[in-house]
């Protein structure tokens, strides 16, 4: 089994910064891609940013230039540095990883439990 645990969420004022962290553990053979998604109340879950094992990154237009995704392949960890936060960034942020397990054949996506980010005065 594979577990993903997020941390770093909290309450921050507009214009402030937060850094989210996520680490995958368990019966992991390899990790292909890791990423961050978010879900605001009453809205669909949306992609925030992803990073491949080779370092290719992709960002939602709404966060491009403000957020930076990075990873540590040796630790199976992914991070999201969030700067210039806006109230519309308020959401539960979920870590994801596309993983091949030790005894598995195919890759599949795993999800963390989510961490709350609230941007408010």
Image (cartoon, helix red, strand yellow):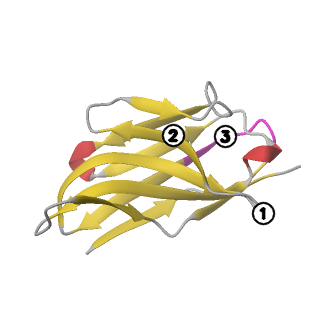
Q: Quadrant of residue 17?
A: top right
Residue at the image point whose x is 38% and y is 48% from the top: 34
| Image position of 62 (left or right of 19) | right
Sequence-earlier tag: 3 or 2? 3
Which is in the foreground here, disc 3 or disc 2? Answer: 2
Q: Is 102 located above or below residue 50 in the figure? A: below
- Which mark is in front, 1 or 2? 1
Rendered location of residue 115, percent (x, y): 59, 63
* Residue that numbered label 3 is attached to: 17
Mark 1 and mark 2: Cα distance apart in space: 21 Å
Q: Is residue 111 above or below residue 21?
A: below
Q: x%, y% of residue 12? A: 75, 50
> Which disc, if any, is residue 49?
2
Instruction: Please name which of the two marks, 3 or 1, marks the residue nearer to the observer.
Output: 1
Of 115 and 109, which appears nearest the observer?
109
What secondary structure is the magenta-colored segment mainly? loop
Q: Give the magenta part as a residue range.
A: 13-19
Q: Would you say residue 10 is visible in this rendering?
A: no
Q: Is residue 87 visible?
A: yes
Q: Secondary structure at mark 1?
A: loop
Find numbered disc 3 in the image and state the secondary structure of the residue it sits on.
Answer: loop
Q: CA distance from mark 3 to mark 1?
A: 24 Å
Q: Secondary structure at mark 2?
A: strand
Residue under numbered circle 1: 42
Dividing the picture into quadrants, the one containing residue 14 is top right
Residue drawn where x is 25% and y is 44% of the image: 73
Q: Are marks 3 and 2 in contact (CB under 8 Å)?
A: no
19 sits left or right of 51 in the view: right
């Amino acid at each position: 089994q594979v577990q993903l645990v997020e941390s770093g969420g909290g309450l921050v004022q507009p214009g402030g910064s937060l850094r989210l962290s996520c680490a995958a553990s368990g019966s992991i053979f390899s990790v292909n891609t890791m990423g961050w998604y978010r879900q605001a109340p009453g809205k669909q879950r949306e992609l925030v940013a992803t990073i491949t094992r080779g370092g290719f990154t992709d960002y939602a237009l709404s966060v491009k230039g403000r957020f930076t995704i990075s990873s540590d392949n040796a630790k199976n960890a992914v991070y999201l540095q969030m700067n210039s936060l806006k109230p519309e960034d308020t959401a539960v942020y979920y870590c994801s990883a596309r993983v091949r397990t030790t005894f598995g054949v195919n890759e599949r996506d795993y999800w963390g439990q989510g961490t709350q980010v609230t941007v408010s005065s």
